[in-house]
Amino acid sequence: MIKTLKSFFATKLSYQVRELYISASMICFATSMVAIFEPIYLYKNGLSIQSILLFYLGIYVTYLFIVPFGAKFARRFGYEKAIFLSTPFLALYYISLFFVPSNFLFIPIAILAFTLQKSFYWPGYHADFARFGRDGERGKEVSNIMAIMNAVSIIGPFVGGLIISIFGFSVLFVVATAVILLSNIALLATPEKFKPVDFSYKDAFKRLFAKENRRNFFGYVGFGEEFIGMVIWPIFIFTLITNFLSIGSLVALASLTTTIILLFVGRIVDGAEDQRRSVLKIGSVFKSFVWLIRMLVSGPLGVFLGDALSRTTNNVIVVPVLAMTYDRANDTSVMKTVVFFEMALIVGKIIAIVLSLAVIALLQDSFIALFLIGALMTLLYSLIKFEPIKVVNHE
């Protein structure tokens, strides 16, 4: 029995990955308190769906051009230092969001702060995981940290909804900021051993649009559907349920139902290569179907089922994709591979935003049409090839 249970968990974690688990879990708790309510907060304070989309378009367009600089910093000074540097910018982002309703001049500050946070955090996070993870346990390592984040995300939305209901958004932003800053303690536990290496800004874009990487590029573009889930779905929920505590509780319950499934997915992904492909393709088709189901949601039970099914199928997609990306990163170049992944993902979200703006202009805030965009983009995941990204540069 104990041996069976152990087979679901990564047992050879390096200390770098352990530190990343702790730090990432704390950041996940802070962001999960806010994330589901963030677009609702903007919507509730007078921004139209179109304005909110333009806000995020500003973030992702800026992010696309700044993320290679974040990678350059991480390669020069260390992955953990890049993660450490990202946290004050996330705190500034939440502070700026708080002041947006009183002065819209805080919008560009929020955009720049969030862009810098993501540009330092994600290259450092992915590279740290890829560099110090163990071969043969990638699937379990990814599923385990996602399971921990899911567990944390069970508490986060409920706590966030409770804080908003009693104290308001201002206290929520303060609490989230404090947890984010405390997350750095884990990264400072042991000194990072690191050899500085240069990273080419220009070659990052060459790899992104190289013919050799085209299939994986379009596969990663599928992550644009995540944007519909992160921004449009919460606003849709708010049109059905206006009580913040109820929204947080439903999302927390949906997170609970998906955590155990994550462990099974991680175990399968560490099997043969064909199993990874099968898991990804099945997840892609089923999540596309879940987007179609969301079109029929009309009450609290529908919100719960739609969110739980989406989280479950998302895990079936993300675990094999990240495990493959981290495995293949070590076959060529860790930072070049994870930055390609992140930049293709950004392009996907930009495409999702532009398509959503077109739909709103033509069909007047049609959630059904917006969810259809999510369904179609989800099918792109099945294009991802489990092979190393071609470096195609002269560094």
Image: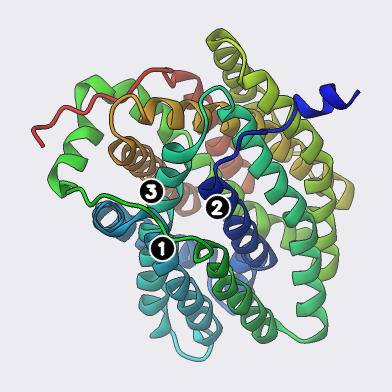
Where does label 2 land, which residue?
Answer: 20
Q: Which residue is drawn at 67% across and 57% down?
A: 234
Determine the residue located farthest toward the left in the rendered image.
394
Horizontally, is 355 left or right of 378 in the view? left
Q: Which residue is drawn at 56% across and 26% down?
A: 320
Tell me which label, 2 or 1, sits earlier in the chain.
Answer: 2
Question: Considering the image in quadrants, where does the C terminus appear?
Answer: top left
- Is residue 67 or residue 132 the one in the foreground? 132
Where does label 1 land, which residue?
Answer: 54
**Looking at the rendered structure, which numbered label has been put on residue 350?**
3
Residue 214 in picture, x, y percent from top left: 29, 24
- Is residue 188 or residue 381 the one in the foreground? 188
Residue 258 in picture, x, y percent from top left: 78, 39
**How many labels, in total?**
3
Circle 2 crowding by C-alpha within 10 Å: few under 14, some 14–19, many from 20: many
Q: Distance between the residues labelled 2 and 1?
A: 33 Å
Q: What residue type is labelled 2?
A: Leu
Query: Is 327 drawn above or below residue 337 in the view shown?
Result: above
Residue 36 in picture, x, y percent from top left: 67, 61
Q: Which numbered disc, 2 or 1, marks the residue closer to the eye?
A: 2
Q: Which numbered disc, 3 or 2, marks the residue closer to the eye?
A: 2
Q: Which amino acid does label 1 sit on?
A: Leu
Tell me which label, 3 or 2, sits earlier in the chain.
Answer: 2
Q: Which numbered disc, 3 or 1, marks the residue closer to the eye?
A: 3
Horizontally, is 29 left or right of 336 in the view? right
Q: How far apart are marks 3 and 2 (CA)?
A: 28 Å
Query: Is 221 drawn above or below residue 198 in the view shown?
Result: above
